[in-house]
Image (cartoon, rainbow, N blue to C red):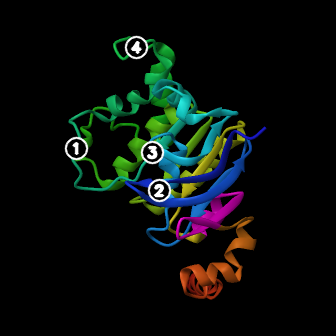
């Protein structure tokens, strides 16, 4: 049975549909990457799938249950969303540890309940996995964009959901942590969980995912294995460039300098 099922989904902002008729199923243990030009609806799709955006028609189902009928706490037990972050944003003056620990909310009786030993162990494990050990007491207002991205990544992992949605998760990350992200996501789905990630870089999408969905103007125009999507003529049409030639050029530059 699919962890996630999206059926003929239409949604957007105001009276305008941004996502138009998208359908797909995501089984346990799979990573699906979503790529496409800026403004094609990738982030809107993630927000609707996470239950954060009203659905005009169609449906989003998690283990057969409509996401729109789940409470916020129920969704938090099953779904984590890593939104895009950036430098210069306004954040409360929480420490790194406090921010990551917020991800344990769904596992406690109330927001006023004290953290258990299991909570603390999970927080420190996830911080260590994303390279935040030693920064526990640092205010998130003083972090770099890459450090802040790793804080929110740890907060998503510590929720221990069935599915994680990631919107540009490699944003601001150094190459070391991009490589670590790929390893973490593959380990994550290895335990039967699933992930959907929006990626700007098609090469990174190919490296991390089992399937790639290509979006254009709010629609899914192709959903297949990374090689089938990246080498397709539709890819060239959507991005208005020879993507295969670009990938070969990047590869050739790399090999010439190695």
- Residue 100, how many percent across, how many down? 39, 33
Q: Which residue is mark 2?
A: 43
- Residue found at the far front of this picture: 15
Nearest to the eye among marks 2 and 3: give it: 3
For mark 3, what is the residue? 53
x, y percent for residue 71 = 49, 25
Q: Position of residue 102 (x, y in %)?
A: 38, 28
Q: Quadrant of residue 236?
A: bottom right
Distance between mark 3 and mark 1 Cα atoms: 28 Å
The Cα–Cα distance between marks 2 and 3, rounded to whole angstroms, is: 11 Å
Work out whether mark 2 precedes mark 3 in sequence or the reverse, and give the earlier one: 2
Q: Nearer the viewer, residue 40 or 208?
A: 40
Instruction: Classify the position of the C terminus by image quarter.
Output: bottom right
Q: CA distance from mark 3 to mark 4?
A: 25 Å
Q: Marks 3 and 4: which is nearer the front?
A: 3
Disc 4 target residue = 110
Highlighted range, magenta = 203-220
| Mark 1 secondary-structure assignment | helix
Q: CB atoms at circles 3 and 1 under 8 Å apart? A: no
**At 39% from the left edge and 42% from the top edge, which residue is drawn?**
151
């Amino acid at each position: 049975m699919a962890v996630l099922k999206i059926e003929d989904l239409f949604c957007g902002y105001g009276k305008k549909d941004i996502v138009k008729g998208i359908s797909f199923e995501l089984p346990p243990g799979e990573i699906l990457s979503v790529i496409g030009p800026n403004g094609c609806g990738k982030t809107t799709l993630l927000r609707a799938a996470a239950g954060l955006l009203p659905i005009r028609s169609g449906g989003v189902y998690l283990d057969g249950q409509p996401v729109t009928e789940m409470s916020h706490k129920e969704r938090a037990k099953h779904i984590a969303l890593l939104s895009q972050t950036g430098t210069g944003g306004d954040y409360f003056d929480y420490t790194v540890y406090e921010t990551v620990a917020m991800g344990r909310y769904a596992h406690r009786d109330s927001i006023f309940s004290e953290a258990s030993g299991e909570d603390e162990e999970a927080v420190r494990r996830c911080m260590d996995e994303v390279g935040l050990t030693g920064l526990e007491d640092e205010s998130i207002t003083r972090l770099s964009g890459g450090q802040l991205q790793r804080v929110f990544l740890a907060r998503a992992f510590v929720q221990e959901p069935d599915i994680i949605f990631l919107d540009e998760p490699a944003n601001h990350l150094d190459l070391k942590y991009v490589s670590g992200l790929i390893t973490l996501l593959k380990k994550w789905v290895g335990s039967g969980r699933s992930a959907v990630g929006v990626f700007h870089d098609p090469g990174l999408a190919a490296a991390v995912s089992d399937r790639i969905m290509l979006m254009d103007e709010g629609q899914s125009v192709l959903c297949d294995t990374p090689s089938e999507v990246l080498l397709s003529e539709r890819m060239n049409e959507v991005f208005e460039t020879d993507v295969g030639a670009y990938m070969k050029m990047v590869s050739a530059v790399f090999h010439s300098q190695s």
